[in-house]
Image: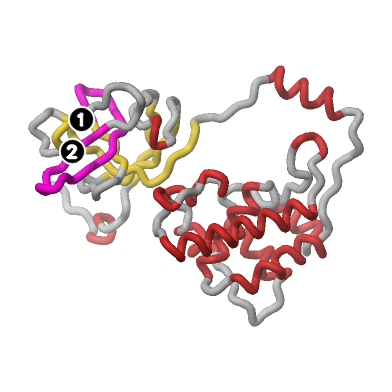
Amino acid sequence: MLPVLKHVLQQRMTVRIYIDDDSMKDAGFQPNCELEVLLSSFAGNGDIVVAVHNGTLIALAYHTDNEGKGWLVSCNDKEPLIFPADGDSGIEILGKVIRYSLRSPRVATELLRQRIDAGKELPGRHLPSKEKVGGVLQSIAHMIGIKRHWYAVYRAFADNGIVEEGMYETFTQLVYSMVPQPAIMPDATTLRRMAIDCFARPVSQWSMERAPFGGKRYELYHSIAVKTTELIKKITCSHWGMPDFTCHEKYLHRNYA
């Protein structure tokens, strides 16, 4: 027995795990992916969990049938794996997946060489001005009804390279510097909490079935993200086959201070 402070026990304990199989391929998980897992033996209907089976880690979906019995099911185009979740089958739930990403994404060197060779004769890229970026934010501000709606705008900015992925503080500073108050303003903590389920992915991969909520609430977030994307496309030129504006912390300080 070891005494542990109460506040430590209340913390959300998470680990990062690499999964190399294709058990959840139909749910969008690819082999060689990284999963952030909340350590817990509890899972809700439809949650994706990481379980230990014969000493091997495997990602499975948790399902509760009409009789209230829990099952662990794979999601791929092969013969499905189905296990009872009561522990009697020798499979144990390690925790619930709360975030997913590809492991060490890379681009083939030959593809990069071809892109560079093809782009050498194109005009140089240019960055949209502070006024144009501010115009996008000001144009979309009237659609913002609560702080969380700004996440849809952030997601469009991240998808198009205007802010780096996960740089919520940077995006928040950008809004505060360019949107006149008293408009509803975002905060980084609220934005970070919205990056769950399909919302953690590019807008092109959003779907109501995989969103944290549905109905008109989802449709509003999606419409804000789509509208923002359309406005961004109008102020950017796609020389070199990629967005022409990359906004890092140093760039913000130098150009938008």
Q: Position of residue 2 (x, y in %)?
A: 16, 48
Q: Residue at x 81, y 26 (%)?
A: 116
Secondary element type, mark 2: strand
Per the rendering, the mark at residue 82 is 1
**Few, some or many residues within 10 Å of mark 2 (<14, 14–19, 20+):** some
Identify the magenta region: 52-73
Q: How far across and down, in percent of the image, does residue 86 sit?
A: 11, 38
Kindly check if marks 2 and 1 are in contact, taking CB atoms under 8 A apart as contact.
yes
What's the residue type where badge 1 is placed?
Ile
- The disc label shown at residue 71, or none: 2
Element assignment for label 1: strand
Q: How far apart are labels 2 and 1 at the CA level?
A: 7 Å
The quadrant of the picture occupied by the C terminus is bottom right
User: Residue shown at 28%/38% (left/top)?
Assistant: 61
Q: How many marks?
A: 2
Residue 169, given in percent of the width and then of the height, sits at: 59, 60
| Lower sequence index among marks 2 and 1 | 2
Q: Amino acid at mark 2?
A: Trp
Closer-to-camera residue (73/79): 79
Question: Is 123 situated left or right of 24 in this image?
Answer: right
Q: Which is nearer the eye, 95 or 199?
A: 199
